[in-house]
């Protein structure tokens, strides 16, 4: 009963947050206008809005706000799974070097023009993210496949691809390209469309279903690999499945929105304070909390210095750093 009430409240809060966030901006739009436009496009009602107002809602603000919710939910879920698999409260979705690989892929497309215009920045970022993760898998497997080797391999891949990104930007980019690349690297939801939303949402749904199917396994990992193996868990297979699943989701999110940090690090801890450590309850609540959080962070990022936009990653860092310090402090007290 308590779980149902908590989840229903979270879903209602998310729906209200999306509706209200869409109304915030230079054009005056009401929540009723938002519901009218959504209902009309879903074929369950008629919209009396002008084409301009309908376009602002459906083509500009709604895709961006929904993608913010999807990214927040996905990053939070990935962070929860990574912290359990690696038994590290400071792990986040980018510990496998996916964001650095995505950055390199994006820079190669934008600055070097690889693909001759046929490859988009999102595609380049996605390919780069997969290359980075493949390198992490290869290194960790070669070094023994233990948890600490996975983390160290991720750090190595992160440094390598960060260096490649910096090298390409320093040697080949002009001032305008550098500014555009830097804005994207810090996380940006501007210019996204419904295609980005549906791709990321589809990957999020698949990831959630796979992770929810492994909730007991994730609970077992909290006691360590040996304890999980003693409980009948195929540690190697499970780790590969969950690492690949979360890496694929992270790659999809980063390729659409850039590297938005601290969501996957901080939100799992906030959700645990509400639900406890059992993943059957934790994962859905974490997803909802991450979605609501990033919807409002993105709203703040695009309006606080209007008409100038602040990268979403900057705002999440400003909020996340104090929370990160708190997590470090609590971790020190419990060790």
Image (cartoon, grey):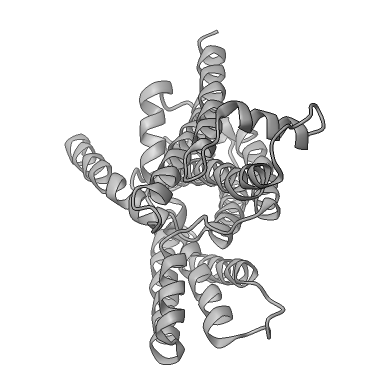
Q: Is 61 above or below relative to 333?
A: below
Q: How many marks?
A: 0
Q: Image quadrant for the N terminus?
A: top right
In terms of image quadrants, where is residue 84? Answer: top left
Q: Is 170 above or below relative to 56?
A: below
* Drawn side of residue 99 relative to residue 318, left or right: right
Residue located at (49% from left, 65% from top): 140
Residue located at (60% from left, 71% from top): 121
The one of 129 and 29 positioned closer to us in this rendering: 29
Q: Residue furthest top?
A: 1
The one of 319 and 53 positioned closer to us in this rendering: 53
The one of 80 and 13 positioned closer to us in this rendering: 13
User: Is residue 254 shown to the viewer in this render?
Assistant: yes
Residue located at (59% from left, 35% from top): 232
* Drawn side of residue 67 relative to residue 187, left or right: right
Location of residue 225 in the rendering, given as x and y in whole percent from the top left corner: 46, 43
* Drawn side of residue 231 relative to residue 209, left or right: left
């Amino acid at each position: 009963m308590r779980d149902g009430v908590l989840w229903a409240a979270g879903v209602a809060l998310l729906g209200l947050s999306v509706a209200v966030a869409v109304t915030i901006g230079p054009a005056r739009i009401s929540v009723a206008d938002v519901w009218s436009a959504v209902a009309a496009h879903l074929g369950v009602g008629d919209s009396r809005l002008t084409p301009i107002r309908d376009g602002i809602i459906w083509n500009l603000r709604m895709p961006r706000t929904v993608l913010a919710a999807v990214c927040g939910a996905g990053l939070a879920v990935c962070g929860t799974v990574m912290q359990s698999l690696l038994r590290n409260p400071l792990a986040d979705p980018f510990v496998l070097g996916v964001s650095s690989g995505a950055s390199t892929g994006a820079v190669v497309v934008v600055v070097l023009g690889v693909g001759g215009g046929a490859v988009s920045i999102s595609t380049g970022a996605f390919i780069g993210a997969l290359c980075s993760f493949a390198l992490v898998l290869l290194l960790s497997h070669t070094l023994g496949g233990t948890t600490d080797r996975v983390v160290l391999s991720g750090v190595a891949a992160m440094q390598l691809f960060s260096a490649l990104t910096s090298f390409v930007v320093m040697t080949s980019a002009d001032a305008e390209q550098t500014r555009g690349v830097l804005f994207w690297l810090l996380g940006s939801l501007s210019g996204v469309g419904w295609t980005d939303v549906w791709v990321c949402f589809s990957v999020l749904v698949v990831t959630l279903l796979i992770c929810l199917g492994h909730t007991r396994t994730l609970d077992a990992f909290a006691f360590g690999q040996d304890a999980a193996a003693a409980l009948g868990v195929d540690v190697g297979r499970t780790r590969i499945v969950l690492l690949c699943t979360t890496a694929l989701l992270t790659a999809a999110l980063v390729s659409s929105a850039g590297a938005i940090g601290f969501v996957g690090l901080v939100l799992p801890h906030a959700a645990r304070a509400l639900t406890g450590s059992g993943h059957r309850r934790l994962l859905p609540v974490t997803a909802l909390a991450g979605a609501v959080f990033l919807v409002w962070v993105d709203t703040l990022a695009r309006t606080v210095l209007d008409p100038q936009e602040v990268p979403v990653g900057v705002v999440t860092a400003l909020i996340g750093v104090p929370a990160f310090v708190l997590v470090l402090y609590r971790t020190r007290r419990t060790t």
